[in-house]
Image (cartoon, rainbow, N blue to C red):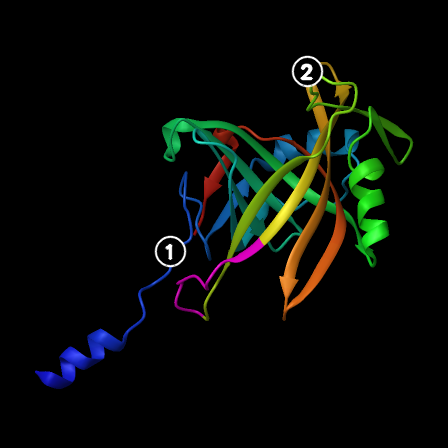
């Protein structure tokens, strides 16, 4: 009896990564392959997979009513789910699939200030000959990046439990362009800052994405 009591006392509580729509850490999902192949020629991305394994989960609390969950996959991207007014499936307001395009290291305070002031937010952004227009506009002439903090949960071994989340401070701006009537492609510029082994690590992440309908997502694991 005493042995069992001490064992339970010493066990650390399990860490649970956020879940929604059946999407979970260590799980898998498939996208409608036909729809994916039809839209892909219009987008910057190439060779997007229809089957994805979720390797990490990120959570961002935008405000008291809005939460962003990011399900990072083995295809160098993530499925992003915006929740509004709650945290279950009935509160899903938007779903996008993002792919990482480029990561640029930032190596000095001066360069970091330049990235925040000039690189992240501008009226337009150019990528591979395409012009994207800024989405998040403020009432002032200069729209500063939107500040947010992401807590990212990795998988702990093969148990399915999550590791203690890593924190990343982010300063982001969203852009968009119309690729065909009613179809948008998005560009996200994010200046990221986190502490690794007591040292500040900074980078500029450029990603492109597109809208996904929840009905086009099939949970397979």
Residue drawn at point x = 43 percent, y = 31 percent: 64
Residue 27 part of the magenta-drawn span: no
Give whichever of 215, 98 is nearer the camera: 98
First to last magenta residue range: 158-167
Residue 164 part of the magenta-drawn span: yes
Distance between the alpha carbons at the discs numbered 1 and 2: 38 Å
- Badge 1: few (under 14), some or many (20 or more) residues near its Cα, within 10 Å? some
Proximity of marks 1 and 2: CB atoms separated by less than 8 Å: no
Question: As drawn, is 94 to the left or to the right of 131?
Answer: left
Residue drawn at point x = 26 percent, y = 77 percent: 10
Give whichever of 101, 49 is nearer the camera: 101
**47, above or below 156, in the image:** above
Residue drawn at point x = 45 percent, y = 48 percent: 220
Question: As drawn, is 174 to the left or to the right of 156?
Answer: right
> For residue 3, what is the image quadrant?
bottom left
Type of secondary structure dominating the magenta stretch: loop
Q: Residue 182, labelled with which disc? A: 2
**155, above or below 106, in the image:** below
Describe the element under mark 1 as helix, strand or loop: loop
Question: As drawn, is 215 to the left or to the right of 43?
Answer: left
Residue under label 1: 16
Question: As drawn, is 136 to the left or to the right of 14?
Answer: right
Q: Position of residue 167 (x, y in %)?
A: 56, 55
């Amino acid at each position: 009896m005493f042995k069992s009591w001490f064992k339970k006392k010493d066990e650390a509580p399990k860490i649970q990564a956020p879940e929604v729509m059946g999407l979970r850490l260590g799980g898998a999902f498939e996208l409608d392959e036909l729809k994916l192949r039809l839209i892909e020629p219009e987008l910057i991305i190439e060779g997007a997979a229809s089957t994805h394994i979720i390797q990490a989960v990120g959570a961002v609390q935008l405000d008291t009513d809005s939460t962003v969950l990011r399900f990072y996959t083995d295809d160098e991207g993530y499925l992003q789910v915006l929740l509004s007014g709650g945290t279950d499936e009935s509160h899903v307001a938007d779903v996008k699939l993002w792919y990482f395009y480029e990561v640029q290291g930032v190596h000095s305070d001066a360069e970091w200030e330049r990235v925040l002031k000039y690189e992240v937010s501008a009226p337009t952004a150019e990528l591979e000959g395409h012009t994207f227009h800024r989405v998040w506009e403020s009432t002032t002439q200069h729209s500063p990046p939107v500040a947010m903090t992401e807590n990212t949960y990795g998988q702990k071994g093969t148990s399915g439990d999550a590791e203690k989340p890593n924190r990343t401070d982010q300063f982001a701006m969203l852009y968009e362009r119309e690729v065909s009537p009613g179809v948008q492609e998005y560009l996200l510029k994010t200046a990221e800052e986190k502490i690794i082994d007591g040292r500040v690590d900074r980078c500029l992440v450029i990603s492109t994405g597109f809208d996904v309908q929840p009905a086009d997502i099939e949970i397979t694991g």
